[in-house]
Image (spheres, rainbow, N blue to C red):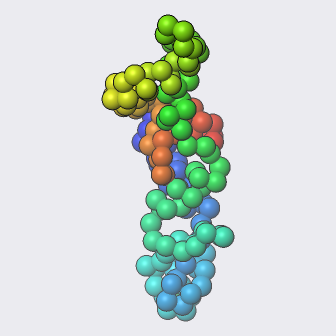
Amino acid sequence: MNVEEIKNKLTELAFERTTPFCYMCYQLCPNGRCEDCGSDDLMRHLDGVGVEYGTEWIVESILEEELEAIDLDDSFEQMIEDCYGTEVQIGFIKSDVSTAIKNLDPIAWDVAKGEYLDSLIEDVSIVEAGNGYYWKHELEAFLS
Ligand SMILES: [Zn+2]
């Protein structure tokens, strides 16, 4: 799946999981038109969450409930560990590599973290969706 397919599938899922809702008559309208006032200008109702126009909030809610957004800090530290090992010794002090870099040069740490995020986006390893970033393979597994 490419990013657009993923986004489309998430929107489809948002429609599947919700029911049209007439806010004026305050009722569900599963047929897509309100039986009382005839309106087709309907919100979406997500059980246990609420009613609102649009689908973005539904996607956010579904992803928050069912997938884990990437913790960029954790993921970056893991990558640093994979590249440079877990422990470093400077003189007589031993430290884990991430802590050492963060303390020695916090700006370099942030810059490298930003580049790491950019590279993940560029490779399409991760996809921005809902309120955060998700691993693409996890989104694909979730959607299929
Ligand atoms: Zn109505």
* 109 sits left or right of 57 in the view: left
Residue drawn at (60%, 36%) of the image: 138
Q: Quadrant of the C terminus?
A: top right
- Residue 63, horizontal then vertical, whole percent: 58, 51
Residue drawn at (62%, 61%) of the image: 17
* 119 sits left or right of 50 in the view: left
Identify which residue, 32 or 50, lies in the foreground: 50
- Residue 39, horizontal then vertical, whole percent: 46, 85
- Residue 70, horizontal then vertical, whole percent: 54, 38
Q: Is residue 71 above or below residue 82?
A: below
- Residue 97, horizontal then vertical, whole percent: 52, 18
Query: Would you say residue 82 is visible in this rendering?
Result: no
Residue drawn at (61%, 69%) of the image: 49
Identify which residue, 62 or 107, lies in the foreground: 107
Q: Is residue 121 above or below residue 130?
A: above
Identify which residue, 63 or 100, lies in the foreground: 100
- Asked where in the image residue 29 lies, by quadrant, the reply is bottom right
Query: Would you say residue 117 is visible in this rendering?
Result: yes
- Asked where in the image residue 116 lies, by quadrant, the reply is top left
* 116 sits left or right of 94 in the view: left
Q: Is residue 2 above or below residue 31?
A: above
